[in-house]
């Protein structure tokens, strides 16, 4: 099955693939060969509780094997600040941070040294996920004189939105100085949002004087029950993250997150995507989210067919006294960005267009008014209510052209 997915990931522009791994057995070598054949870089993520020192030799053999197979990045641990990252006995330790460091340092140090010889492929990078209160482990590394490890360590941050806007907590503690662990005063924002990584970077920088590289994992996961988050809203946020990954300017669209050179990669989880899509994970649905060139054919249509009407394509939106809804604007963003239509709210103005795309509103645009547009010679398209369905529709149209 994985051989089927690699070409799809390549077509979608993916460069890195995170594979969860066990300390008990190696991932088969042919998985790596298939990945490299499709220009994919595999990142190994050991999600289990880190082993005790007595198992170090067994894990070292495993790391040697992955290095031989061309692996460059290894993630050690999975949210060790959470109970789910431990067995019951490990979680109950009185000093959880030092307990974690006792397990983490030997492995991370071995990875760092394994990356040093020219004959080895494994880079000196290890990463964990965590929240600000848990990041006392960084001073712990310094106290144990692991300065070389600190220099080369990378952080992994979960890109959960917690059902908040993608700008929540942007800028880290420098922008929200009154926020403390587990205490967010009114008018302040905290790390519980997509920009969690900036808070982690700031804490590490205070200790080391250097801003660490970050790998963002499971970007766009609402981290709350999908019925509360709303699948459409969560998918739209995920698509905004994709736009930011592809270099869309944050000053053009204020709700986009801001990425800088410290981001190693921003990755997405297939299980999360399947959840947001209601279990209907398919190549077409993934292309509608990640296919950045899927709508280019629409934008480059031959304009000669539109002679006789001054407007080529009109996007007709419902507007009330308070203006057009932000939710509606987000849903039609794929059309606006890729097709560059004339945008307006006037039925009379829309009659001057060859093609009219209408975001449905039965009160503002009843059947009689839509019929009047068709009578005026317009090709009328009624858009779906869902943002993801709009993007999927446009992808299907461009595929047929």
Image (cartoon, rainbow, N blue to C red):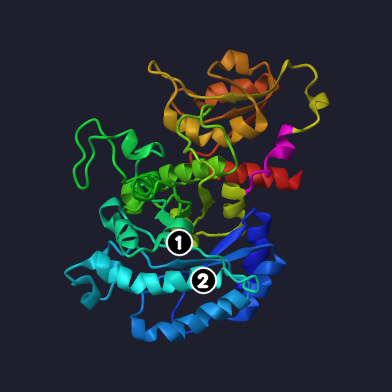
Question: Does residue 48 appear anywhere in the picture?
Answer: yes
In the rendered image of this protein, does residue 257 appear above or below residue 67?
Answer: above
- Which residues lie in the magenta part? 291-299
Residue found farthest to the right: 304
In the rendered image of this protein, does residue 315 appear above or below residue 130?
Answer: above
Q: Secondary structure at mark 1?
A: helix
At x 49%, y 84%, the residue is: 25
Q: Which mark is drawn over residue 148? A: 1
Give 20 or 317, whichever is nearer the viewer: 20
Q: Which mark is drawn over residue 367? A: none
Q: Position of residue 283 (x, y in %)?
A: 61, 58
Give 325 or 108, whichever is nearer the viewer: 108
Query: Mark 2 highlights which residue?
Result: 113
Q: Residue 297: within the magenta? A: yes
In the rendered image of this protein, does residue 391 appear above or below residue 140?
Answer: above
Q: Residue 41: within the magenta? A: no
Quarter where residue 102 is shown: bottom left
Viewed as shown, does residue 240 lie left or right of 103? Answer: right
At x 45%, y 86%, the residue is: 58
Q: Earlier in the sequence, mark 2 or mark 1?
A: 2
Distance Cα–Cα, label 2 vs label 1: 10 Å
At x 55%, y 21%, the residue is: 369
- Crowd around label 1: few <14 · some 14–19 · many ≥20 (10 Å): some
At x 68%, y 63%, the residue is: 7
Give 241 or 345, whichever is nearer the viewer: 241
Quarter where residue 356 is shown: top right
The quarter of the rendered structure image containing the C terminus is top right
Give 239 or 300, whichever is nearer the viewer: 239
Question: Does residue 27 appear anywhere in the picture?
Answer: no
Q: Secondary structure at mark 2?
A: helix
The quarter of the rendered structure image containing the N terminus is bottom right
In the rendered image of this protein, does residue 289 appear above or below residue 27?
Answer: above
């Amino acid at each position: 099955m994985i051989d089927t997915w690699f070409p799809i990931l390549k077509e979608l522009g993916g460069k890195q693939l995170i594979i969860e791994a066990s300390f008990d057995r190696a991932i088969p070598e042919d998985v790596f060969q298939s990945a490299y054949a499709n220009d994919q870089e595999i990142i190994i993520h050991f999600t289990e509780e880190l082993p005790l020192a007595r198992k170090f030799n067994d894990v070292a053999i495993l790391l040697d094997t992955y290095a031989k197979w061309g692996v460059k990045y290894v993630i050690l641990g999975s949210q060790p600040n959470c109970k789910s990252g431990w067995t019951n006995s490990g979680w109950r330790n009185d000093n959880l941070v030092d307990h974690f460091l006792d397990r983490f340092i030997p492995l991370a140090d071995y990875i760092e040294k394994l990356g040093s010889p020219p004959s080895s492929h494994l880079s000196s990078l290890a990463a964990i996920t965590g929240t600000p209160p848990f990041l006392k482990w960084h001073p712990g590394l310094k106290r144990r004189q692991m300065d070389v490890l600190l220099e080369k360590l990378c952080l992994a941050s979960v890109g959960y939105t917690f059902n908040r806007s993608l700008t929540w907590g942007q800028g880290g503690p420098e922008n929200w100085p009154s926020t403390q662990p587990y205490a967010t005063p009114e008018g302040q924002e905290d790390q519980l949002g997509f920009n969690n990584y900036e808070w982690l970077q700031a804490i590490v920088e205070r200790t080391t004087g250097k801003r660490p590289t970050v790998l963002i994992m499971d970007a766009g996961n609402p981290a709350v029950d999908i019925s509360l988050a709303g699948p459409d809203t969560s998918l739209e946020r995920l698509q905004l993250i994709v736009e930011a990954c592809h270099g869309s300017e944050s000053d053009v669209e204020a709700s986009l997150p801001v990425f800088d050179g410290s981001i190693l990669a921003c990755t997405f989880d297939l299980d999360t995507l399947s959840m947001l899509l209601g279990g209907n994970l398919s190549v077409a649905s993934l292309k509608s989210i990640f296919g950045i060139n899927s709508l280019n054919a629409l934008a480059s249509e031959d304009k000669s067919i539109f002679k006789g009407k001054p407007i080529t394509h009109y996007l007709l939106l419902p507007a009330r006294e308070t203006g057009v809804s932000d939710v509606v604007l987000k849903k039609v963003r794929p059309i606006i960005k890729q097709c560059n239509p004339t945008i307006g709210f006037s039925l009379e103005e829309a009659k001057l267009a060859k093609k009219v795309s209408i975001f449905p509103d039965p009160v503002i645009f009843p059947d009689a008014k839509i019929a009047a547009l068709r009578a005026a010679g317009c090709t009328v398209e009624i858009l779906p209510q869902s943002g993801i369905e709009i993007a999927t529709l446009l992808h299907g149209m461009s595929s047929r052209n």
